[in-house]
Amino acid sequence: MSQSLHNVIQQAEKIILGKPQQIRLALACLLARGHLLIEDLPGVGKTTLAHVLSRTLGLQFQRIQFTSDLLPADILGVSVYQRDNGKFEFHPGPIFAQMILADEINRATPKAQSALLEAMEEQQVTVEGKTRPLPSPFFVIATQNPAYQIGTYALPESQLDRFLMRIQMGYPDAQAERGLLSGVDRREIVAQLTPQMESSELLAMQKSAREIFVSPALLDYVQAILRYTREAARFTHGLSPRAGLALLSASRAWALLDGRDAVIPEDVQAILPGVVSHRLQAVGEYSKQNSDVLVRELVEAVAIP
């Protein structure tokens, strides 16, 4: 691992106490050029993690608060008539930033949610017939409240698939919570964070992650996982080819974080819950199991070549 990445993780762990796995998964998602969905109860640090990553990585940051009355134009921008020259001038929306926090994304209507689809897939937006590129790197962190809470709209499968990973923060352990309760306000500490790398270095690391070696045997393992989800009766449908590519990209990034130049099966197993839990839907008696149990059974069912 490079010194810069080590500094990023070290600084983040001082703010997000007791969550080293979630921090590494979020970084792996970014290094794989993916987008991150954090689903959990309010107040467990979802928004704080996004702020910490943006400041630590030195990225231009914008927060979009998703509400039921949010419109696509509030996200993408709008053309405003200028009386001085008699022309319409485009005013960019908050989507034109390197890191976007889509806060409580499932509290907005599907129409507002769909405004992110082109941006997340193609790193561009089309407004009023004109296509405009987005900054690079471009990264969306969306937070989501559990579906059973009042005022939420379920994300459609097409949008869920745009997120390379979905993670949960969970409650802190006793020691971490004690540190939160007895320490300085997290917001004050976040405001004092200094960038540990520049955008150009992050782009170079993303390129390095794509060059991590994947052996034919490892590809066999990934294909076996994909095949199992498509053939097992417990799932409504199997993982798509896009999910397979996401699995490989995230595994490469995880290997990079571990300082290796080749992917091993343990890398795939480490990021598997984050990559596939929001893409798999169980049926019948299996629908009562939570996603962690389903993924664990998937790991146990598919043998390493």
Image (cartoon, rainbow, N blue to C red):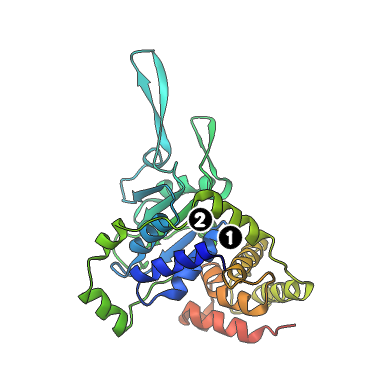
SS at badge 1: loop
Tag 2: residue type? Gln
In front here: 56 or 7? 7
* Quarter-of-image position of residue 70: top left
In the image shown, does 26 or 165 lie closer to the viewer?
A: 26
Q: Is residue 137 left or right of residue 183?
A: right
SS assignment at label 2: helix
What amino acid type should be assigned to the residue bearing mark 1?
Answer: Ala
Q: CA distance from mark 2 to mark 1?
A: 18 Å
Residue drawn at the location 45% of the way across and 64% of the way down: 8
Q: Which mark is residue 32?
A: 1
Determine crowd level at label 2: few under 14, some 14-19, many 20+ residues with C-alpha closer than 10 A.
some
Horizontal and vertical percent for residue 297? 58, 85
Quadrant, the C terminus: bottom right
- Tell me the crowding category of disc 1: few under 14, some 14 to 19, or many 20 or more residues within 10 angstroms, Cα based: many
**Front of the two marks 2 and 1:** 1
User: Splitting the image into 4 quarters, where does residue 302 fall?
Assistant: bottom right
Q: Is residue 290 left or right of residue 63?
A: right
Residue under label 2, please give it. 159
Residue 262 in percent (x, y) is at 69, 71
Is residue 177 visible in the rendered image? The answer is yes
